[in-house]
Amino acid sequence: MESLDAALDRLDWTDIGSRLDAEGHAVLPGLLDAGVARGLAQRVAASDARRVTLESGALGRGELFYFGAGMPAPLEPWRTALYRRLVAIANRWNETLGEAHRYPGELEDFLGHNREAGQARAQSHLSRLGVDDHVSLHQRNDGGQVFPMQIVAVLSEPGADFLGGEFVMTEQRPRMQSRPMVVPLKLGDMAVIATAERPFKGAKGCYRVNLKHAISRVREGERIGLELSFHDAP
């Protein structure tokens, strides 16, 4: 089996950065083996998962299952390795926007800054959506230490395990209508998405555009999804 770093190293990170610059998202196809993806999907039944209903937070309808103290393999090493490759893009975005802040090169150091800022509530989770369930437009940018990108994936097969349930993003530019985007995800695909903001180069220079993400209504079956956050919440 191909190693984690080998799988990531063969990706064109210059192209991934360009797609994030242009659209606020970039699909990384087939990074999770189908068997691994389905194994992760079964974690929704794990007794140590913290279950939260989307209705309780007015975020839609369905269930979220937050990981406890440690995430199951292979998610923790994947998160660490993906951070190492995305941090250069995050720091370039800050430079483009004139921000002095720079993110450290390693995830553990960044999480240390989270803890110092009082952010210790893990946000990475699985979602389970049945018929008529959905996730409303939202952002996961609570706290002063927010990484500008996160990872999403689908762990069940569109068209076979469920119908509907498309991953959707919106982008709001100043004085313009929101721009909707459907991010095409297949079983085992991951996507890097902007957490809440990204730089946009306009006619008068660079400015921030605001992004949110959602999952459309599931029409048939059951959709299991994954969100990996690099920062914790207060």
Image (cartoon, helix red, strand yellow):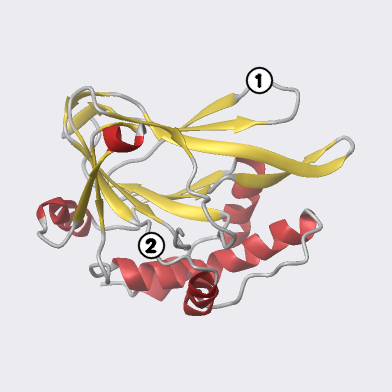
Whether residue 221 sits left or right of residue 22 in the image: it is left
Amino acid under label 1?
A: Gln
Say which residue label 2 marks.
Answer: 121
Whether residue 77 sits left or right of residue 101 in the image: it is left
Q: CA distance from mark 1 to mark 2?
A: 34 Å
Amino acid under label 2?
A: Arg
Frontmost residue, 23 versus 54: 54
Secondary structure category for the residue under label 2: loop
Residue furthest right as drawn: 204
User: Residue 177 — which label?
Assistant: 1
Which residue shows up at 30% across the image and 53% down it? 125
Estimate the x, y position of residue 40 in percent, counting from the top left.
20, 57
Which residue shows up at 58% across the image and 77% down it? 105
User: Label 2: few (<14), some or many (≥20) within 10 Å?
Assistant: some
| Foreground label between 1 and 2 | 2
Estimate the x, y position of residue 186 in percent, counting from the top left.
31, 41
Frontmost residue, 94 versus 114: 114
Q: Earlier in the sequence, mark 1 or mark 2?
A: 2
Frontmost residue, 16 versus 133: 133
Secondary structure category for the residue under label 1: loop
